[in-house]
Amino acid sequence: MRRLIIPAAACLLLAGCTAADKPVADASHGTPVVLQLNWFPEAEHGGFYTALVDGLDAAEGLAVEIRPGGRSAPIAGELASGRVQFAVANAEDVVMFRSQGADIVTVMAACQHHPRCLLMRSDSGVKSFGDLGRQGMTLQVQQGHAFLEYMRAKGLLAGVKEVPYTGGVSLTVRDPKMAQQGYVYSEPLLARQAGVEITTLMLSDIGFDPYSSVLVTTAKLVRERPDLVRRMVAAATRGWQRYLADPAATNRRLLEVNPEGVTAEMLDHGVATLRDLCLPDGMSPERLGTMTAARWDELLAQMTALDPTLAGKVKATDCYTLDFLPQQE
Amino acid sequence: MQPLPAAPISCRRVGVRFPGGRDVLAGVDLDVPAGGVVSLVGPSGCGKTTLLRCVAGLQRPTTGTIEPRPESLPPGALAYVFQEPALLPWLDAVHNVMLPLDLIGRDAPAGRRAAAEHWLGEVGFGVDDRAKHPGQLSGGMKMRVSLARALVTEPAILLLDEPFAALDDLLRTRLTELLLDLHARHPRTMVLVTHNIGEAIIVGDEVCAIDRGRIGGRIAVDLPRPRPARVRGGAAFSRLYDAVCDMLAEAAR
Amino acid sequence: MSRPRPPLHRLVLEALPALAVAVAVVACWQWAVGHWKIPAYLLPSPAQVATALWEKRVVLGHAFWVTARAAVAGLAAAAVVGTALAILFSQSRLVRTALYPYVLFLQTVPIVAIAPLLITWSGYGQRTVILVSAIIALFPILSNMTAGLLALDPNHRDLFRIYRAGRRPTLVRLRLPTAMGHLALGLRISCGLAVIGAIVGEFFVGRGGDFPGLGAVMDRWLTMGKTDALMAAVLLSSLLGLAMFAAVNLLTDRLLGKYVQGTGD
């Protein structure tokens, strides 16, 4: 009996290693495809998980593996190396990747509006972006994000003390003078669960509103395997349509893959908010995922105003393609 | 600065037992008259350094008495010359010699410096070398500084633990002569520990043999002082040398 | 006295092998990026890093001095606190055995856990950056100084006993000077840690004053994916570490050189 202990332990160790690597792929047939997320799996990725969970990927002949991201998701590198074929990002990230020389293209935009917001306690007295400076707030932000520079250019950060944002909501909950960045369907809910009244300010309200939860790939893949891209876009679009209508199964899966980062309550709240972001103003579900040239032009104009060197490096039309989306009526 | 009168040393049945039961010294009797010199000879590990440390107050004897009791002497009345020069490397020669005066707080700093310079002169240390640090001095020069440091408080008792062991023969002879010369001009009670028989004879009034913690014998040295180097070539010296060798061989049995 | 300085041309000759390695590495790197067409956001070429270094020279220049000041202040604070604690530890075995484990604990707790606490107590400012730097730099100074204060040449100790020197004169005239050599060693080890500490502190505190330090700009360029500028900042960080090491070496040689000499035997 004793002599079996070491081989048994070795087997367990190996099993543990391989189990950790096991991808979240249900279908064992079809073209293998890897989708890289830009953060830990949350509601903002819901539709992509629905496509997997409800067999929509398999129906298009795709065996999709979804790779969660984290604090730093090296999307550009992963796409360039060919280790992943698709990724989830935000429109402003695509501009940034292209400015670094990565030939990345947006093929579908799940959310028409951006969830970026600032949040703070309601007893801070802040009711608008202008109040941040007037109330002498301290703002926890990640330096380098486009929305921050956008606010700075509008003079909204005058009198505001910027400090690094390292995650969570604990500092904001404890201190009425503390504000932070967040996504409208995550951090505000976490803060409310901690028992404080929260005010949120949406960046989209002051005009910074790139597409979010966009599906991106390399221009090379679009050129060489357009059929694959078409199938992926179709599956993802259907996935999002279904997620917004009936998220229960997907949310269960999200809880499984990210038990530390999300709660059932957060996900339910997330879906409710996403419905407004993805299908605003009564947009019909068939139009989910579509993009317009005008929106991309506007984004490029805004970002070039903040960083003039972009003008030479990035053209709006290179950032996206409408070829795989239903045509405008 | 008042020179302290030379004090006689008297050890009665001094014993030192180390933890573990080993008797490093047992029943040692030793008398040194005021101003007299006793040389202690013996093989390595015989306890002669331990005896010296007891007299100095660095080691507490397990049994027996020592007069004068080291704690009853005023600081500076007793001086010790180590096997190594043991100079402080961050002080120059003058300040190394001044150190005992600084520690016992005697005199004003100006007076201390003058005393240090005086004694450096007495040991034949060059004026130009006073500002040098030990790292820049040769072995012989460092030993001279060490001697000067021991003498700067004009101690009543001077204890020397194989002071010239690390030096070559030539230096050794020269410094032994210096020691004799200093003793002649400023007599003080001295105990010299050495394993060099010739040195023991030429310096001491009496040579005591120690072996395995016990006194093996005593031989009085009847050579007249002063004792210049050529005394070593004389018949009286040779006789004494043989006698000491026999005594040591006897003690070893 | 300290060792005589070798003539300049000898120093240059000594430095040549290391310089040759640097040139070879840079050449290989430039070639590899070109040959394998490595994209800039993954690994910029030396030329791109140099360009970023030039383009961002004003920001980087300010950042260098901000971080340098914080690291120097952190090192100085660590030296003062480390020496004071070492003196305390050397005087009493009871104090040593009671407090040393907590010093060790402070060293092993990851700074990412301590930094938010420090910010809560000390706020978002340069002072907190210096605090982080000092905490990270403390241990080598403290442990070396304590060892130095306790490590006495037995003859020196006996010498002081012969002349009945009390606790304070022994500390001031013997233990402290003996420990100076160990202090020099501790400072040399700690100066690199002080730089790391300042940069880590800046990750958590952000901009502590008028200008962002190297840590703050690195954080920003990491988020923006500007790998070439990031590498330029990393390069400057190591330069800062080297500069501090050289400065500390020079200073300890000048001031503490005579203490490091050996026992003079």
Image (spheres, helix red, strand yellow):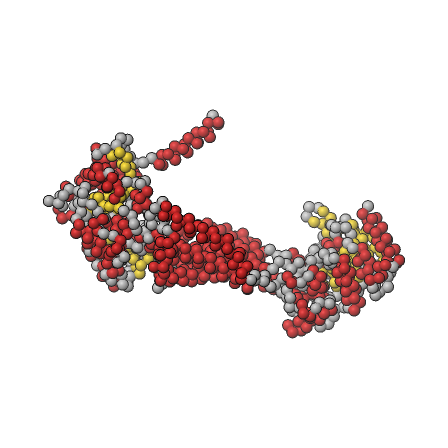
> In the rendered image, is residue C59 in sight?
yes
Could you say which quadrant of the image residue C174 lies in? bottom right
Which residue corresponds to the image point at 18% horizontal and 40% vertical from the top-left?
Answer: A241
How many numbered tags mark residues here? 0
Name of the residue lying farthest toward the top: A1
Foreground pick, A108 / C127 = A108
Horizontal arrangement in the rendering, residue A76 relative to residue C91 (left or right): left
Could you say which quadrant of the image residue B183 lies in? bottom right
Residue C66, image x, y percentages: 39, 62
Horizontal arrangement in the rendering, residue C138 relative to residue A271 (left or right): right
Q: Is residue C237 above or below residue B181?
A: above
Could you say which quadrant of the image residue C202 lies in? bottom left
Quadrant including the N terminus of chain B: bottom right
Which residue corresponds to the image point at 44% horizontal and 58% vertical from the top-left?
Answer: C240
Residue A24, image x, y percentages: 30, 36
Which residue corresponds to the image point at 26% horizontal and 41% vertical from the top-left?
Answer: A221
Foreground pick, A114 / B104 = A114
Foreground pick, A141 / C32 = C32
Horizontal arrangement in the rendering, residue C162 relative to residue A26 (left or right): right
Residue B193, image x, y percentages: 76, 57
